[in-house]
Image (cartoon, coloured by chain):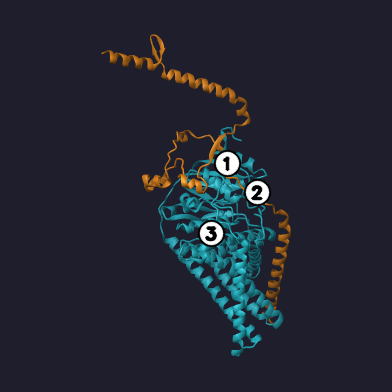
Chain colours: A orange, B cyan
Amino acid sequence: MELIPILSLIILVATISTFILAVGAYILYKVRERKGITAQAVQPSAIPAELVAPAPLMQEQRIITPERRTFEQQSSQQGYGYEYQRQSSYYPPQEEQSRGPELKPTFVGSAPTNEQRQTGENLRTNEGERSTSGSKKKYMRYTNEGYVEPTRQERKQEDNLRWR
Amino acid sequence: MNKNNQKYQIALDNRELKPPKRNIGAEKLRVIFFTGIFSLFLIITIILTLPLTVLTWSGLFVYASIVSLVIFLFILLIRYFGTLFMAYFYITKYTVQEKEGFYPFISIIVPVFNEGVVLQHSIESLLDVDYPNYEIIIVNDGSNDNTATIAEELVGHQRGRSGLVKISLINKPNSGKAKALNAGIQYSEAQFVLCMDGDSQLTPNSLRSAVRHFIDPSVGAVAGNVKIQNRKHLLTDLQALEYLEGLNMPRSAQGFLQMVNIIPGPIGLFRKTALRDAGFYSSDTFAEDADVTLKILAQNWKIIYEPNAIAFTEAPASIYQLLKQRYRWTRGILQAIRKHKRHLVNPTINFNNSIILWQMFYEALIWPAMNIFVNLYFILVALFYGLSSFIFLWWIGIAVLDLMSAVYCIAAEKEEFRLVPYAIIYRVVFILLIDVTKAMATVEEFLGIRMTWGKLERTGLGGSQKTANNTAGAR
């Protein structure tokens, strides 16, 4: 028997089998998938989410002042090399916000862990006290009369000036 | 969870740029009307002109078959050689061209949905990336397995190849990959974002190779090179060959024109400005990567292909999973084409986009139909006319072309040569299987039958790409 008819038969059988396999597998796929179809819910404009992020490293700790400027302004101010540095927050212009998603998520608040929840109140109180006392010491002036408010001193200087 | 980590409640913007509402009924009626008119015109022409020729009805069948086959062969050869030549030009240009180093800060966004099995490997591969300035943002899209726990364990400043890498996690309710990526992009502060899949693993020089293209300010995105990780199985090896021959080679050809039509989901690097111009990812199609690519191209941004930015991904290992994936791809691409159809019919809006859309239309609709038709034709001729040698000759012609392409692609990408013999059955078995699914999906898309996303099952058998038993991409 010649080789070509045998190979032709093999190819013919392979092609027909592939067709049958493809159609069969497709029908099976549709039957299995039919169960999973559910109606889609209406999507809200904002969705709540949780962010888990590591505490910032020392070099990362800096006060970020939100500068209301567009990306184009930013790039024109800084020239070509701006992309080498990490950017501060980007705020899209007002008209863009109205037509599409924002570039920054809105922080709603912190989600404390259980441990933090237990000790949180005490810590907050202590921190509050420390900051208050710290601010007092920072802004009070120590004189022979004890701690004196700087405003009193300033007022005195002003009086003196006026007196002269 | 690491004690140093902090948890915040955030609100993510869930809005999307929506295309105008469609009147599906009117669209269908219009298509039926025009196709009906066209078919009627053809039938009337044949009936009126046939008596004027020397052909009979049976002769017409033979004559039409020969003409159809000649046209088919012509298109086939143009498609093969056009793609091969352009891919060759691109690889040559790529090899010769020197580009300076460019190291901006990059956010890698890893959307995950029930990827607990593979997430650890993915993050390990990301920490091994040879790049000095990047962070990782994992977006857990409402997984209901242990993904959230695994991801929380990974959060922190992890030691990477080039220093500490910050890993953050966003836990959000399930709403699809597009919205998960958008959430990560919203949180990111970088000007460049790398979007990938939860099961993808990057090679160490991926970022370095991809990001240097952005030194050209007109480049909006860079498409990476996707390779199959779980090989040594007939179906996955065939897919590995398909990725090389059917996806990466055309992508190289498109890279030559700087108009890549699909930035693959497993690895795509974007300039955030380009994404913003495009309106970010949309969840109204099942191929968000194709859609966002078309939107970026429509805004006149260039898209480059970077063969050295390699991502390994897990391929479906069963026919059911494969069909599920291809069904979603086909319908998603058709949805994306339909969404941008004004560019298809009006080349004056953006000529480049029109070319890309016509090419996608051809690959998604015309080519599968032609392939199925030609195979059915040869089966018919063999069964009813006894001309079985034709199908053999057809197969041998196609197999030679596929072998030639396979050798070229494997050599160009320094891939495994053991994949070459698969080219013998690639067209006649594998592609036919895929094309039948594509045709069915096309019919369903036309009929407007509803579909679900269809989450693929991950086995995690691919393991880490360090242990993956192949030398692919070692350029």
Q: Position of residue A139 (x, y in %)?
A: 41, 19
Q: Quadrant of residue B236?
A: bottom right
- Indicate the amino acid at tag 3: Ile
- Indicate the amino acid at tag 2: Ala
Pick the front one: A28 or B199: A28
Label 3 and label 1: CA atoms lie apart by: 27 Å
**Residue B5, above or below A22:** above
Pick the front one: A130 or B3: A130
Q: Position of residue B117 (x, y in %)?
A: 65, 47
> Residue beneath label 2, please?
A41
Does the rendering let one see residue B374?
yes
The quadrant of the image that shows the N terminus of chain B is top right
Nearest to the eye among marks 1 and 2: give it: 2
Q: Is residue B72 left or right of residue B347?
A: right
> Residue, x 69% and y 72% (percent of image)?
A14
Does the rendering let one see residue B471?
no
Q: Position of residue B220 (x, y in %)?
A: 46, 54
Residue occupying the far top of the picture: A145
**Quick one: SS at disc 2?**
loop
Label 2 and label 3: CA atoms lie apart by: 29 Å
Q: Earlier in the sequence, mark 3 or mark 1?
A: 1
Residue B262, label in figure? 3
**Quick one: SS at disc 1?**
strand
